[in-house]
Structure formats: structure tokens, C-alpha cells
Amino acid sequence: MHMFTCLRVWQFIVRKPSTVNRHCRFVVRMSSTDRTGPSDTKKSFEDKYFDCAANGNVEELKFLLQATFNSDHRNDKGWTALMLAARNGQVHVIEALLQKGCDINLVNKTGQTAEDIAVFWDQKKAANMLTDFIKKENPDKQLRNYFSLNNLDRMAENRKDKDWLQSRLKKETTRFIIFSDLKPLVRLSGDATQRYKYTLVRLAYSDIEFLLKTNPLLVFLGVESDESTKDNSTVLDEAGQALFALDVTDTDESKFKTLVGEAEFTTSYHVLMQLEPSDAGIFAEARSLLDWLDRYKFCATCGSATTVAEGGYKRICDNKSCRTNKGIHNTCYPRTDPSVIMLVVSPDGKRCLLGRKKQFPAKMYSCLAGFMEPGEALEDTCRREVYEESGVRVGRVDYHSSQPWPFPCSLMLGCLAHATSENIKVGEDEMEDVQWFRRSELVQMLTKQHPQGLYIPPEQAIAHQIIKAWVRMTANL
Ligand SMILES: NC(=O)C1=CN([C@@H]2O[C@H](COP(=O)(O)OP(=O)(O)OC[C@H]3O[C@@H](n4cnc5c(N)ncnc54)[C@H](O)[C@@H]3O)[C@@H](O)[C@H]2O)C=CC1
Ligand SMILES: [Mg+2]
Ligand SMILES: [Mg+2]
Ligand SMILES: [Mg+2]
Ligand SMILES: [Zn+2]
């Protein structure tokens, strides 16, 4: 899949070009002649790259982009090449950088995106180009968090029909993604400079037929839809490519080496966070389902064995007289555990509350978060969890966006919470530290330039997106 799709993940609803800092200056650093040694070579390479972007030298920029190099690299003002090109209206450079898959939603140290910069400096052509690109990728301007971009039509009605499922299984176009012990089979598909360079390995029925003899877990994930099929269920049913997840936990993993070559079963967080975003969404669906099917084998009501039905979306109790066989019971369906994650803003609107759980890597701070409890509105969960973890009182709560978190089945509901008190009393059962941070410090943490090395979770985490959204909203404070 093309890298452009990745950018869909990072769109924001909040746009406030009028709040852009009008005193910002752009600086293009010229390469110094008296530098020597490898780090200086790298520095002059970067300087050259920024020069080309700012001055419209497309041919040389394209040449530099071929090298192993992070095209979203920032200068000391937190500016990317795309921002420099936007500042100077270099539309050809912008075109080349977007094609390369540069992140259009990164912000500089004053919270401006490339689009904000182009608008601010009256670079109309560049601004229109960036706006059109954002609209095309995400017409609703709705934030799509990592793990939530899933282009499958799940065909919930069809999956109840065993014959339909069976015919889908054997269709030539049908594909299977493979899991062993909840580890997906992935391969490196992009070049090393791309942010999302792994894809799920998809096999055909003829590849996996021999594995079906032992009756492994098989989950129907849906039918891949595109522009031509998404609003027409008949066409989708005929032409769409069905996708199943196959669990091969009891099969010798080395068999897959001969089948697919350079691919690996992985639980590496690092690799999973670099899945092509639409595959990350498919992975999330498949992993949560396989985990549920594996861990909920017995009826929660009477303890009898259960049988998998509806393509993996239901477990039916084998005990005919069980209550769950009379009427609809939620214990037969996959779980989703809602939890809230919130950026708490101080009463004066200038600081945010972040904390460290005991298990976090050193120096990482994140939004406070917690599981919802029965009978709670999500606003009340925010208030309770913030109070438990920090002693701070919260009033109004605004919803931001959500993120499925498939380890094993959380749904993170992201919010902005407005504090009504400031005193912190760290909830030591869970937290190691909780602090108020000023906006300027959040920017340093966001751009990994904090003097004490403090940082926040990566952009794949909803916490990062909520923090980034607040930094953007408050760009002129
Ligand atoms: N993306 C991010 O930056 C962050 C994400 N998170 C996620 O937020 C979610 C909730 O946050 P926590 O601080 O862990 O919740 P929490 O503050 O409610 O505390 C966790 C404790 O809640 C209890 N609990 C209640 N219901 C549970 C359930 N359904 N599953 C597991 N434990 C449950 C357990 O005793 C557990 O130790 C987790 O999935 C966590 O991975 C948490 C912090 C940052
Ligand atoms: Mg918590
Ligand atoms: Mg808690
Ligand atoms: Mg809790
Ligand atoms: Zn039962």
C-alpha cells in the first residue's frame, strides 16, 4: 500500500491558523566549511537537505532523499524540510516530500504545521496544496489513531452463514494472515527510511490448505473494500477480497520460512508500531479476537465447553439447557474493555498534568489513564482516575478521539479534562510521579529536546496525539 495512506492516521480536527505566532522567523543554516569528521559530514548533509527544501532545489533534494535518511528530520527550531518548503512556497519540493511520505502533521517548536506556516506566510499555492492533500487523505478531518484504521467491511450478517463462509474460505482471491501464539507473521516491505515499513504476510488458500486438517482457530476478519465497492454490498460480496486470520500456534514455525522466505513472527513492540497503518488496524482486530477465543473457552454462565461460531465472533455454549442459549447474552461475544486517557489542563489553561507509572521506561511521562468501572459515565471515570492517581479535581471533560489497544482488548477513550484544583497528591499504589508541565516543556518533550531527557510516548500512542493537539490549540499563549 502506498505511503500516502499512512498520513491518514495523523489528521487533526483542531485547526487554528489565526493563533500562529507571528514573530516566528525561519532560519536556513548554511553548511560550514571548517567541519570535519563523520558527525560533521552528517550535519552538512542535513544542512544541504534543508537548503534544497527552502530554495526549491528539487533535483538535488530528490537525490538526497534516496539515501538512508529520515526525511522528517528537524532543524534546531523543530522545522522539517516540508515546513521550510511551505514557508517559501516551494510547491515542487512539497510535492516531492509528500510523495516520499513526509508527515504533514508534525509541528515545530511553536506548534505550527507546514500548512499553518504556508497560510501564515501567504504562500497560497503551497497552502492550497497542503490543504488539498489533507482533505484527500481524510475528507472528514477526523483523527485516525494508530490501530484504528481498518478498511475491512466486517460483513456481520454474512458471517452468520456457514456456507457463505466456507465458499469465501476457498476463493482464489481470499487471503490469510497468520498468527502463532498471538505473534503476527510480518515482513519488511518498505525501505529503511520509511516510518511504517512492515506489512502483514498474506497467504492464499492453496498455501495454507494443509494446515486446516487439525482444525485450527480461524477468524473471518472481513472483506477488503475500496472506493468502487464500499457502498455496494453486492459488488463487494462478488469482488471484494476476503481476509481471515489463521492461528498456527501448534505448527512448526520454520515451515513458514520455506513458504514465505524473509518473514518473522513477532511480538516486538518496535516492529508492531511500524506496521503499515491499515495493517495495524487489521492486526488489532485479529489479535483481540484470537486472544478472546483462546482465553474464553468455557461458558461464563455454566462452565460447559463452547463452540466457535460466526467466523470467530461468537462462542455458543454446548450445554443446550444453558441460559445463554435462550436469548442474547453478552458473555457469548468478544470483550472490549473501555478505558479513559486524559490530558488534564490546569485551571489557568497553561499547564498539563502528566504522570509516570512505575512500569514506564525511565524519563517517560504520559497522560493519566484508567479502566472504566460498571455504571460509570466516561466523564466520571476521568474525574475518579485523575483524583486517584494525582489528587487533582476535574470539572468539565471533552472527548478527543479513541484508539483500540489490542493488548488484549482495551478501547482507549481520549479526553481533555479541565482541572478545578492544582495540588498534587501522587496516588502511590499506581504512580511513581505526577507533575504539572508548562506548554514550552511539553514541546521539548514532544520533540525530544527536553534538557533532562524527559519524553512522552511515540506518535502511535493516543497520549501523544492528545498532547500534540493541545500544543497546537495553545500555539499563541
Ligand atoms: N497510550 C498511553 O500513553 C497509555 C496507555 N495506557 C493504557 O490505558 C489502559 C488503562 O490504564 P491503567 O493505568 O492501566 O488503568 P488503571 O489506572 O485503572 O489501573 C490499572 C489497574 O486497574 C485494574 N483493572 C480494572 N479493570 C481492568 C481491566 N479490564 N484490565 C486490566 N486491569 C484492570 C487492575 O488492578 C490494574 O492493575 C491500559 O490499557 C494501558 O495500557 C495507560 C497509560 C498511558
Ligand atoms: Mg492508570
Ligand atoms: Mg488508576
Ligand atoms: Mg482504575
Ligand atoms: Zn453455558
Image: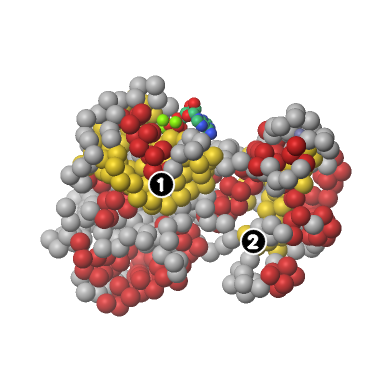
Q: Tell me where residue 231 appears, x and y as whole percent.
A: 62, 72
Most distant residue in the left direction: 23
Observer able to see residue 340: yes
Q: Residue at x 44, y 67 (%)?
A: 140
Most distant residue in the bottom direction: 125
Of 174 and 406, nearer the camera is 406
Of 237 and 89, nearer the camera is 237
Q: Which quadrant of the figure has residue 449?
A: top left
Label 2: which residue? 153
Q: Tell me where residue 193 appears, x and y as whole percent.
A: 45, 53
Which quadrant: the N terminus?
Answer: bottom right
Q: Which quadrant of the figure has residue 180?
A: top right
Q: Quadrant of ligand 5?
A: top right
Of 253 and 344, nearer the camera is 344
- Dot 2 falls on a residue whose secondary structure is strand
Of 451 and 240, nearer the camera is 240
Left or right, 248 with respect to 412, comes to right
Disc 1 marks a residue whose amino acid type is: Gly
Labelled disc at residue 414: 1
Q: Tell me where residue 470 appears, x and y as whole percent.
A: 29, 51
Most distant residue in the right direction: 213
Q: Measure the C-alpha gap from mark 1 to mark 2.
A: 25 Å
